[in-house]
Image (cartoon, helix red, strand yellow):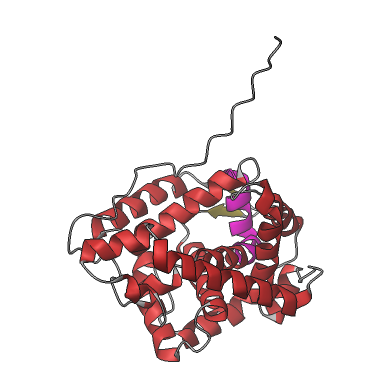
Amino acid sequence: MNMQAKPPKAAKPVPRGPQVNFLEPAGDPGLSGPGSPAWKVFHNPLALAAGGIAAVILELAEPAVRAGVWDHSTFKVDPIQRMVNTGAAAMAVTYGSKKAAQMTFDRVTRMHERVTGQTHEGKAYQAMDPELLTWVHVTAAWGFLQAYIRYAEPDMSREDQDRYYREGAAKGYGFGAKWVPLSADEVDTYMAEKVKGLYVNDTVQEFLKIVGDATPMGKAARPLQRLLTQAGIDLLTEDMQKACGVRVTHPLGVRGVRAVVGALAATARFVTRRKGNGPAEQACRRMGVSTDCLYAN
């Protein structure tokens, strides 16, 4: 009998670097802790994915960050692993202990210290430039928050938004920024000024194609990945979309994208509330609190 061996299944990507134990040490709240806006914002995976895509679009439209991210990362050759690594770092500094957060800051800083070069326009840059680190911090914080507000808590108060940015400053400083905005108003002012320096480039379009075709949840979920990519674009303001050269092109249109992603985010919230056992739930056990603190209501 001529039997052909089945090709081995591709290994599931796992975070590179030290693995974080979110269950220990007991009683360590980390950088935020139960009841913080960050513990809610970073909990819904679909909102987090859309917010992350919005952030990367903004980052790649900035000349120096574009060169640093695109020329010195694995995004082009292994986008799934890159997303897994980035997500793992975000979980570590949000739900991990203070020690886990510091270890993550140190590890990422060591990688960034090696990243230097020239922009595509010939200007020298260093990844550890505090101004660039501020931009990366703010775009990520802003993107995740906008996604959370749209798909999880539309009525989130301005006070809670201010608290989110104020408490999140520890992450920005931890990764090397020297200044970060501490309120929603300060973020809005900073973003409005920075958008003036963004520019349309091919890298943004290449990123959108790569992330839209990526299959972190398997090939069957590729339509969902493309939908989330469009949801990320939709989070950007009109001025941001124009500056970055992007717009929603999904056949469902803006309303359709929002409706479907909103329904999926609600489903994810329902499932995690009953069966979740990720970093957030483990952090709750570390602190001896109910997982109710991870939800708006």
Q: Is residue 79 visible?
A: yes
Residue 108 in the image: x percent, y percent? Answer: 41, 50
In this picture, residue 76 sits left or right of residue 93: right
Q: Quadrant of residue 272?
A: bottom left
In the image, farthest residue toward the front: 1
Q: Nearer the viewer, residue 246 or 194?
A: 246
Task: Name the residue: 32% across, 70% down.
Answer: 291
Principal secondary structure, stretch drawn in magenta: helix
Task: Name the residue: 39% across, 57% down.
Answer: 278
Q: Nearer the viewer, residue 48 or 62?
A: 48
In the displayed structure, would residue 272 be above or below residue 213?
below
Q: Quadrant of residue 263?
A: bottom right
Task: Name the residue: 66% across, 70% down.
Answer: 231
In the displayed structure, would residue 138 be above or below residue 25?
below
Q: Quadrant of residue 196?
A: bottom right
In this picture, residue 26 sits left or right of residue 106: left
Q: Is residue 148 magenta?
A: no
Q: Which residues are magenta?
A: 56-74
Residue 120 in the image: x percent, y percent? Answer: 70, 52
Residue 37 in the image: x percent, y percent? Answer: 38, 77
Residue 156 in the image: x percent, y percent? Answer: 46, 87
In this picture, residue 155 sits left or right of residue 3: left
Q: Is residue 58 magenta?
A: yes
